[in-house]
């Protein structure tokens, strides 16, 4: 188990309320020992996902909850890694998330879901190096005909040989895990250039992660916050 999960398990036994900050990877919010929200600069926020799907008529309760759960699982994938070391997670008692959807998650379940997602990604493409490397389209197609999903096409069009999957997820307003799946599928199909050498993991990798792009319209955050607060 990671140091983050060990700390969360202890806070769960103590029924603690507050936040756990994990250096360079994100933050976990707890209420009475249960996880209520996660956020990570490597995964689009709830606000970003909803902004990308802006609807004049608003969202249903089910749609909001689905988006929140997806954002939490996205962030958990990066905050609760199975193999990466972490630097002294810090607990801040009483701190609450800016957006509270009134949802709760067991830390052990989040860890199991992260493991399931890693296993699914490994079945498509065995190396995780693609997850942190710039998305680079292949110079030539492997065959005469290629069928792409809408998301795969958007990724290829947006790929500038600099942006990583996390960058593209935020740019497109798509869940990070969905983009990772698409990137690995395209790599397996020969549509992307795979990294030649593994990237160094740990602190250097964490420092290379760009901060999340802030929302340009504060009224969107206020509207989303009100809608989530109504999810009682």
Image (spheres, helix red, strand yellow):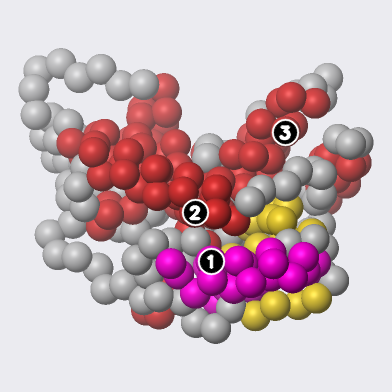
Residue depicted at x 21% and y 42%:
125
Where residue 215 appears, x then y in whole percent? 71, 51
- Residue 208 visible in the picture: no
What kind of element bears circle 2?
helix
Answer whether residue 190 is magenta in the image. no
What kind of element bears circle 1?
helix
- Residue 26 visible in the picture: yes
Task: Tell me if residue 231 comes above or below residue 126 in the rendering.
Answer: above
Answer whether residue 16 is magenta in the image. yes
Mark sitting earlier along the chain (2/3): 3
Mark 3 sits on what residue?
Answer: 65
Task: Tell me if residue 98 comes above or below residue 117 in the rendering.
Answer: below
Task: Tell me if residue 168 comes above or below residue 142 in the rendering.
Answer: below
Q: CA distance from mark 1 to mark 3?
A: 24 Å
Mark 1 sits on what residue?
Answer: 5
Q: CA distance from mark 1 to mark 2?
A: 8 Å
Say left or right for 69 vs 120: right
Mark 2 sits on what residue?
Answer: 111
Where residue 130 appears, x then y in whole percent? 27, 52
């Amino acid at each position: 188990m990671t140091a983050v999960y060990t700390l969360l398990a202890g806070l769960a036994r103590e029924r603690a309320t507050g936040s756990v900050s994990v250096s360079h990877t994100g933050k976990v919010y707890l209420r009475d020992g249960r996880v209520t929200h996660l956020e990570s600069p490597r995964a689009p926020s709830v606000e970003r996902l909803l902004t990308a799907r802006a609807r004049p008529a608003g969202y249903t309760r089910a749609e909001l909850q689905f988006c929140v759960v997806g954002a939490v699982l996205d962030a958990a994938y990066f905050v609760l890694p199975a193999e990466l070391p972490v630097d002294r997670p810090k607990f801040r008692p009483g701190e609450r998330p800016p957006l509270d959807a009134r949802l709760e998650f067991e830390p052990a379940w989040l860890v199991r879901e992260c493991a399931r997602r890693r296993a699914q990604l490994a079945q498509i493409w065995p190396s995780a190096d693609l997850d942190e490397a710039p998305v680079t389209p292949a110079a030539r197609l492997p065959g005469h005909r290629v069928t792409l999903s809408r998301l795969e096409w958007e990724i290829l069009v947006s790929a500038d040989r600099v942006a990583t999957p996390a960058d593209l997820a935020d740019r497109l307003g798509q869940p990070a895990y969905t983009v990772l799946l698409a990137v690995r599928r395209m790599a397996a199909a020969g549509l992307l250039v795979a990294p030649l050498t593994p990237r160094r993991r740990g602190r250097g990798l964490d420092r290379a992660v760009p901060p999340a792009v802030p929302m340009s319209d504060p009224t969107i955050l206020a509207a989303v916050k009100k809608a989530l607060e109504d999810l009682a």
